[in-house]
Amino acid sequence: MNILDAVQTKGNMIPDRYLNMTVSELEDRARAIKSKLGSKLFIPGHHYQKDEVIQFADATGDSLQLAQISAENKSAEFIIFCGVHFMAETADILTSEDQKVYLPDMRAGCSMADMADVYQTERAWAKLTELFGDTILPLTYVNSTAAIKAFVGENGGATVTSSNAEKMVKWAFEQKERILFLPDQHLGRNTAYNLGIKLTDMAVWNPITDSLEYEGELENIKVILWKGHCSVHENFTVQNIKQVREQYPDMKIIVHPECRREVVELSDDAGSTNYIIKTIEQAEKGSAWAIGTEHNLVNRLIQQHPDKHIISLNPYMCACLTMNRIDLPHLVWCLESIENGEQHNIIKVEDSIAVKAKLALDRMLELS
Protein backbone atom coordinates (compact mmCIF):
# COMPACT_ATOMS: atom_id res chain seq x y z
CA MET A 1 0.00 0.00 0.00
CA ASN A 2 1.44 3.39 -0.96
CA ILE A 3 1.09 6.49 1.18
CA LEU A 4 -1.86 7.86 -0.83
CA ASP A 5 -3.78 4.60 -0.48
CA ALA A 6 -3.01 4.54 3.22
CA VAL A 7 -4.28 8.08 3.74
CA GLN A 8 -7.49 7.32 1.86
CA THR A 9 -8.19 4.15 3.83
CA LYS A 10 -10.99 4.82 6.30
CA GLY A 11 -9.28 2.84 9.05
CA ASN A 12 -6.34 5.21 8.94
CA MET A 13 -8.37 8.36 9.67
CA ILE A 14 -8.29 9.50 13.28
CA PRO A 15 -11.62 9.18 15.15
CA ASP A 16 -13.14 12.51 16.20
CA ARG A 17 -13.06 11.69 19.88
CA TYR A 18 -9.29 12.12 20.01
CA LEU A 19 -9.62 15.60 18.58
CA ASN A 20 -12.13 16.48 21.29
CA MET A 21 -10.04 15.31 24.23
CA THR A 22 -8.29 17.86 26.44
CA VAL A 23 -4.51 18.06 26.56
CA SER A 24 -4.47 16.66 30.09
CA GLU A 25 -6.68 13.72 29.06
CA LEU A 26 -4.41 12.96 26.13
CA GLU A 27 -1.27 13.19 28.23
CA ASP A 28 -2.75 10.94 30.92
CA ARG A 29 -3.64 8.29 28.32
CA ALA A 30 -0.19 8.46 26.74
CA ARG A 31 1.53 8.00 30.10
CA ALA A 32 -0.77 5.15 31.10
CA ILE A 33 -0.25 3.18 27.90
CA LYS A 34 3.50 3.78 27.91
CA SER A 35 3.62 2.44 31.44
CA LYS A 36 1.47 -0.56 30.55
CA LEU A 37 3.47 -1.57 27.47
CA GLY A 38 6.82 -0.93 29.11
CA SER A 39 9.84 -2.14 27.17
CA LYS A 40 7.63 -3.53 24.39
CA LEU A 41 7.08 0.06 23.24
CA PHE A 42 9.68 2.44 21.85
CA ILE A 43 8.94 6.00 20.69
CA PRO A 44 11.69 7.73 18.68
CA GLY A 45 11.09 11.45 18.11
CA HIS A 46 12.75 13.55 15.45
CA HIS A 47 14.29 16.88 16.46
CA TYR A 48 11.68 18.77 14.44
CA GLN A 49 8.69 17.37 16.32
CA LYS A 50 6.44 19.49 18.52
CA ASP A 51 7.15 19.62 22.25
CA GLU A 52 3.77 18.01 22.95
CA VAL A 53 5.07 14.90 21.17
CA ILE A 54 8.77 15.09 22.14
CA GLN A 55 7.84 14.88 25.83
CA PHE A 56 6.86 11.23 25.25
CA ALA A 57 9.87 10.31 23.09
CA ASP A 58 12.23 7.64 24.44
CA ALA A 59 14.98 9.00 22.19
CA THR A 60 15.42 12.14 20.09
CA GLY A 61 17.68 12.55 17.12
CA ASP A 62 17.86 12.72 13.34
CA SER A 63 16.16 10.23 11.06
CA LEU A 64 18.93 7.66 10.51
CA GLN A 65 20.12 7.82 14.11
CA LEU A 66 16.60 7.06 15.36
CA ALA A 67 16.18 4.19 12.90
CA GLN A 68 19.46 2.68 14.10
CA ILE A 69 18.49 3.07 17.77
CA SER A 70 15.16 1.41 17.01
CA ALA A 71 16.92 -1.53 15.37
CA GLU A 72 19.25 -1.92 18.36
CA ASN A 73 16.31 -2.02 20.78
CA LYS A 74 15.53 -5.73 20.46
CA SER A 75 12.95 -5.71 23.27
CA ALA A 76 10.72 -3.21 21.45
CA GLU A 77 7.87 -4.91 19.60
CA PHE A 78 6.07 -1.66 18.78
CA ILE A 79 7.98 1.34 17.40
CA ILE A 80 5.97 4.53 17.03
CA PHE A 81 8.12 6.72 14.84
CA CYS A 82 7.35 10.39 15.44
CA GLY A 83 8.75 11.83 12.26
CA VAL A 84 7.77 11.51 8.61
CA HIS A 85 7.08 8.65 6.23
CA PHE A 86 10.57 8.06 4.80
CA MET A 87 12.01 7.94 8.33
CA ALA A 88 9.58 5.23 9.37
CA GLU A 89 10.44 3.34 6.17
CA THR A 90 14.13 3.39 7.09
CA ALA A 91 13.29 2.14 10.58
CA ASP A 92 11.28 -0.71 9.08
CA ILE A 93 14.17 -1.63 6.76
CA LEU A 94 16.68 -1.77 9.61
CA THR A 95 14.50 -3.39 12.30
CA SER A 96 13.73 -7.11 12.56
CA GLU A 97 10.69 -8.93 11.20
CA ASP A 98 9.11 -9.27 14.64
CA GLN A 99 9.14 -5.51 15.20
CA LYS A 100 6.37 -3.29 13.84
CA VAL A 101 6.90 0.35 12.91
CA TYR A 102 3.99 2.79 13.15
CA LEU A 103 3.53 6.34 11.89
CA PRO A 104 0.89 8.19 13.96
CA ASP A 105 -0.39 10.14 10.94
CA MET A 106 0.07 8.70 7.47
CA ARG A 107 -0.17 12.21 6.00
CA ALA A 108 3.22 13.03 7.55
CA GLY A 109 5.26 12.94 4.38
CA CYS A 110 8.26 14.96 3.21
CA SER A 111 8.02 17.42 0.34
CA MET A 112 11.69 16.89 -0.51
CA ALA A 113 11.39 13.10 -0.65
CA ASP A 114 8.29 13.46 -2.81
CA MET A 115 10.24 15.51 -5.38
CA ALA A 116 11.95 12.34 -6.62
CA ASP A 117 9.89 9.27 -7.38
CA VAL A 118 11.40 6.10 -8.73
CA TYR A 119 9.76 6.37 -12.16
CA GLN A 120 11.23 9.83 -12.72
CA THR A 121 14.58 8.54 -11.51
CA GLU A 122 14.57 5.56 -13.86
CA ARG A 123 13.79 7.84 -16.81
CA ALA A 124 16.54 10.23 -15.76
CA TRP A 125 19.03 7.39 -15.35
CA ALA A 126 18.30 6.08 -18.84
CA LYS A 127 18.91 9.48 -20.41
CA LEU A 128 21.96 10.29 -18.30
CA THR A 129 23.65 6.96 -19.00
CA GLU A 130 22.94 7.51 -22.68
CA LEU A 131 24.78 10.84 -22.40
CA PHE A 132 27.61 9.80 -20.09
CA GLY A 133 27.82 6.02 -20.30
CA ASP A 134 28.93 4.02 -17.26
CA THR A 135 30.59 7.00 -15.57
CA ILE A 136 27.88 7.94 -13.02
CA LEU A 137 27.27 6.72 -9.48
CA PRO A 138 23.97 7.59 -7.77
CA LEU A 139 23.89 8.90 -4.21
CA THR A 140 20.74 9.67 -2.30
CA TYR A 141 20.16 11.70 0.82
CA VAL A 142 18.49 9.57 3.49
CA ASN A 143 15.59 12.03 3.12
CA SER A 144 14.24 9.95 0.25
CA THR A 145 11.73 7.17 -0.27
CA ALA A 146 12.61 3.52 0.17
CA ALA A 147 12.11 3.06 -3.58
CA ILE A 148 14.77 5.69 -4.34
CA LYS A 149 17.14 4.09 -1.85
CA ALA A 150 16.50 0.75 -3.56
CA PHE A 151 17.27 2.24 -6.99
CA VAL A 152 20.53 3.67 -5.68
CA GLY A 153 21.44 0.41 -3.94
CA GLU A 154 20.76 -1.61 -7.08
CA ASN A 155 23.00 0.68 -9.13
CA GLY A 156 26.00 0.51 -6.82
CA GLY A 157 25.40 3.74 -4.93
CA ALA A 158 24.85 4.66 -1.31
CA THR A 159 22.84 6.87 0.98
CA VAL A 160 24.27 9.96 2.67
CA THR A 161 23.36 12.08 5.67
CA SER A 162 23.99 15.77 6.15
CA SER A 163 26.71 14.75 8.63
CA ASN A 164 28.65 12.38 6.38
CA ALA A 165 27.84 13.80 2.94
CA GLU A 166 31.43 14.93 2.26
CA LYS A 167 32.82 11.51 3.14
CA MET A 168 30.28 9.77 0.91
CA VAL A 169 30.81 12.10 -2.04
CA LYS A 170 34.57 11.50 -1.77
CA TRP A 171 33.89 7.76 -1.77
CA ALA A 172 31.61 8.08 -4.79
CA PHE A 173 34.30 9.85 -6.81
CA GLU A 174 36.66 6.99 -6.04
CA GLN A 175 34.16 4.72 -7.78
CA LYS A 176 33.07 6.77 -10.79
CA GLU A 177 33.86 9.98 -12.64
CA ARG A 178 30.49 11.59 -11.95
CA ILE A 179 27.71 11.46 -9.38
CA LEU A 180 23.95 11.88 -9.52
CA PHE A 181 22.84 13.39 -6.20
CA LEU A 182 19.21 12.86 -5.13
CA PRO A 183 16.88 14.49 -4.12
CA ASP A 184 18.20 17.71 -2.51
CA GLN A 185 20.15 19.91 -4.90
CA HIS A 186 21.28 22.28 -2.14
CA LEU A 187 22.94 19.65 0.06
CA GLY A 188 24.56 18.18 -3.03
CA ARG A 189 25.80 21.54 -4.27
CA ASN A 190 27.10 22.69 -0.89
CA THR A 191 28.86 19.39 -0.27
CA ALA A 192 30.51 19.24 -3.68
CA TYR A 193 31.57 22.88 -3.44
CA ASN A 194 33.19 22.25 -0.04
CA LEU A 195 35.20 19.48 -1.69
CA GLY A 196 36.56 21.85 -4.30
CA ILE A 197 34.23 21.11 -7.21
CA LYS A 198 33.42 24.26 -9.18
CA LEU A 199 29.81 25.39 -9.51
CA THR A 200 30.38 25.46 -13.26
CA ASP A 201 31.01 21.71 -13.15
CA MET A 202 27.59 21.04 -11.64
CA ALA A 203 24.44 20.46 -13.67
CA VAL A 204 20.82 20.15 -12.55
CA TRP A 205 18.43 17.42 -13.66
CA ASN A 206 14.87 18.69 -13.97
CA PRO A 207 12.48 15.73 -13.43
CA ILE A 208 9.49 17.74 -14.63
CA THR A 209 10.93 18.47 -18.05
CA ASP A 210 13.14 15.36 -18.14
CA SER A 211 16.08 17.50 -19.12
CA LEU A 212 19.56 18.51 -18.04
CA GLU A 213 19.93 22.18 -17.08
CA TYR A 214 23.50 23.16 -17.90
CA GLU A 215 25.40 25.72 -19.96
CA GLY A 216 28.76 24.43 -21.07
CA GLU A 217 30.50 21.37 -22.39
CA LEU A 218 28.94 18.13 -21.12
CA GLU A 219 32.31 16.48 -20.51
CA ASN A 220 32.99 19.07 -17.79
CA ILE A 221 30.08 17.93 -15.65
CA LYS A 222 31.14 16.23 -12.42
CA VAL A 223 27.96 16.49 -10.36
CA ILE A 224 24.35 16.13 -11.52
CA LEU A 225 21.98 17.56 -8.93
CA TRP A 226 18.37 16.48 -8.75
CA LYS A 227 16.07 19.52 -8.84
CA GLY A 228 14.60 19.02 -5.36
CA HIS A 229 14.76 20.93 -2.12
CA CYS A 230 13.55 21.18 1.46
CA SER A 231 10.56 23.52 1.56
CA VAL A 232 11.64 24.75 5.01
CA HIS A 233 15.35 25.36 4.48
CA GLU A 234 14.97 26.87 1.02
CA ASN A 235 13.00 29.71 2.61
CA PHE A 236 16.03 31.13 4.41
CA THR A 237 17.32 33.96 2.23
CA VAL A 238 20.20 36.34 1.71
CA GLN A 239 17.86 39.11 2.83
CA ASN A 240 17.38 37.31 6.17
CA ILE A 241 21.15 37.35 6.65
CA LYS A 242 21.41 41.03 5.76
CA GLN A 243 18.72 41.88 8.30
CA VAL A 244 20.48 39.95 11.08
CA ARG A 245 23.84 41.53 10.23
CA GLU A 246 22.28 45.00 10.42
CA GLN A 247 20.28 44.43 13.62
CA TYR A 248 22.79 42.23 15.49
CA PRO A 249 26.31 42.90 14.12
CA ASP A 250 27.98 40.54 16.63
CA MET A 251 25.54 37.66 16.16
CA LYS A 252 26.82 34.46 14.54
CA ILE A 253 24.71 32.78 11.88
CA ILE A 254 24.61 28.99 11.61
CA VAL A 255 22.50 27.21 9.00
CA HIS A 256 21.68 23.73 7.73
CA PRO A 257 23.36 22.66 4.44
CA GLU A 258 19.90 22.14 2.92
CA CYS A 259 19.86 25.95 2.59
CA ARG A 260 20.67 27.60 -0.72
CA ARG A 261 24.36 27.97 -1.67
CA GLU A 262 24.33 31.77 -1.33
CA VAL A 263 22.84 31.52 2.19
CA VAL A 264 25.47 29.01 3.32
CA GLU A 265 28.19 31.17 1.74
CA LEU A 266 27.17 34.24 3.76
CA SER A 267 26.69 32.38 7.06
CA ASP A 268 29.36 31.90 9.71
CA ASP A 269 28.86 28.16 9.92
CA ALA A 270 26.79 25.35 8.46
CA GLY A 271 26.14 21.77 9.48
CA SER A 272 23.69 19.01 10.19
CA THR A 273 20.94 19.23 12.78
CA ASN A 274 23.13 17.44 15.33
CA TYR A 275 26.03 19.75 14.49
CA ILE A 276 23.85 22.81 15.08
CA ILE A 277 22.63 21.43 18.41
CA LYS A 278 26.15 20.61 19.62
CA THR A 279 27.47 23.99 18.47
CA ILE A 280 24.85 25.80 20.53
CA GLU A 281 25.42 23.52 23.52
CA GLN A 282 29.16 24.22 23.46
CA ALA A 283 28.86 27.94 22.77
CA GLU A 284 29.94 30.42 25.41
CA LYS A 285 27.40 31.94 27.76
CA GLY A 286 26.18 35.26 26.46
CA SER A 287 26.93 34.37 22.83
CA ALA A 288 24.38 35.31 20.17
CA TRP A 289 23.12 33.02 17.40
CA ALA A 290 20.74 33.19 14.46
CA ILE A 291 19.82 29.65 13.42
CA GLY A 292 18.64 28.68 9.96
CA THR A 293 16.72 25.47 10.50
CA GLU A 294 13.27 24.16 11.46
CA HIS A 295 11.13 26.33 13.73
CA ASN A 296 10.34 23.74 16.45
CA LEU A 297 14.01 22.95 16.97
CA VAL A 298 15.03 26.61 17.12
CA ASN A 299 12.34 27.31 19.72
CA ARG A 300 13.49 24.31 21.76
CA LEU A 301 17.09 25.53 21.67
CA ILE A 302 15.94 28.97 22.82
CA GLN A 303 14.18 27.35 25.80
CA GLN A 304 17.10 25.07 26.62
CA HIS A 305 19.74 27.82 26.50
CA PRO A 306 18.41 30.91 28.28
CA ASP A 307 22.02 31.99 28.87
CA LYS A 308 22.43 32.68 25.13
CA HIS A 309 20.69 35.03 22.73
CA ILE A 310 19.14 32.78 20.08
CA ILE A 311 16.77 33.73 17.28
CA SER A 312 15.52 32.17 14.07
CA LEU A 313 17.31 33.43 10.98
CA ASN A 314 13.84 33.94 9.52
CA PRO A 315 11.45 35.08 12.29
CA TYR A 316 8.46 34.50 10.01
CA MET A 317 9.40 30.91 9.25
CA CYS A 318 6.68 28.30 9.74
CA ALA A 319 7.38 24.89 11.24
CA CYS A 320 7.65 21.93 8.85
CA LEU A 321 3.99 21.40 7.95
CA THR A 322 4.22 17.68 7.22
CA MET A 323 6.36 16.94 10.28
CA ASN A 324 3.81 18.81 12.39
CA ARG A 325 1.02 16.49 11.36
CA ILE A 326 2.29 14.26 14.14
CA ASP A 327 0.53 15.69 17.18
CA LEU A 328 -0.66 14.51 20.57
CA PRO A 329 -4.11 13.27 19.42
CA HIS A 330 -2.54 11.13 16.67
CA LEU A 331 0.08 9.79 19.06
CA VAL A 332 -2.55 8.75 21.60
CA TRP A 333 -4.71 7.19 18.88
CA CYS A 334 -1.69 5.17 17.75
CA LEU A 335 -0.95 4.10 21.33
CA GLU A 336 -4.53 3.02 21.97
CA SER A 337 -4.65 1.14 18.66
CA ILE A 338 -1.64 -0.89 19.75
CA GLU A 339 -3.14 -1.43 23.19
CA ASN A 340 -6.36 -2.72 21.59
CA GLY A 341 -4.57 -4.94 19.06
CA GLU A 342 -5.76 -2.88 16.06
CA GLN A 343 -3.66 -2.69 12.91
CA HIS A 344 -3.49 1.00 11.97
CA ASN A 345 -0.73 3.04 10.35
CA ILE A 346 1.86 0.26 10.12
CA ILE A 347 4.77 1.09 7.82
CA LYS A 348 5.91 -1.96 5.90
CA VAL A 349 8.41 -1.77 3.05
CA GLU A 350 8.10 -4.55 0.48
CA ASP A 351 10.90 -7.10 0.85
CA SER A 352 12.07 -6.64 -2.76
CA ILE A 353 12.54 -2.92 -2.12
CA ALA A 354 13.89 -3.26 1.41
CA VAL A 355 16.72 -5.61 0.36
CA LYS A 356 18.00 -3.20 -2.30
CA ALA A 357 17.51 -0.14 -0.09
CA LYS A 358 19.52 -1.81 2.63
CA LEU A 359 22.41 -2.20 0.18
CA ALA A 360 22.56 1.59 -0.14
CA LEU A 361 22.29 2.08 3.61
CA ASP A 362 24.88 -0.59 4.40
CA ARG A 363 27.44 0.89 1.98
CA MET A 364 27.18 4.14 3.91
CA LEU A 365 27.20 2.52 7.34
CA GLU A 366 30.31 0.50 6.47
CA LEU A 367 32.16 3.76 5.85
CA SER A 368 30.79 5.55 8.92
Image (cartoon, rainbow, N blue to C red):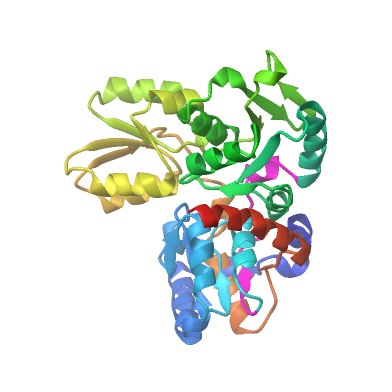
Q: Does residue 107 appear in the picture of this structure?
A: no
Q: Is residue 307 magenta?
A: no
State whether the magenta stretch is mostly helix, strand or loop: loop
Residue sitting at the far front: 174
Q: Is 312 placed above or below 209 here?
A: below
In the image, taking residue 122 as reference, residue 205 lies left or right, namely left
Query: Picture coordinates of residue 77 (x, y %)?
Result: 57, 80
Q: Is 300 placed above or below 200 here?
A: below
Residue located at (55% from left, 42% from top): 171
Which residue is more in the foreground, 355 or 15? Answer: 355
In the image, taking residue 140 as reference, residue 125 lies left or right, namely right
Query: Picture coordinates of residue 327 (x, y %)?
Result: 53, 61
Which residue is more in the foreground, 228 or 310? Answer: 228
Q: Which residues are magenta?
A: 98-117
Q: Quadrant of residue 17?
A: bottom right
Query: Picture coordinates of residue 200 (x, y %)?
Result: 58, 17
Residue located at (54% from left, 70% from top): 71
Q: Is residue 112 magenta?
A: yes
Query: Picture coordinates of residue 196 (x, y %)?
Result: 48, 26
Residue sitting at the far bottom: 36
Q: Quadrant of the N terminus?
A: bottom right
Q: Does residue 70 appear in the picture of this structure?
A: yes
In the image, taking residue 137 as reference, residue 50 lies left or right, namely left
Q: How many numbered marks appear?
A: 0
Residue sitting at the far top: 216
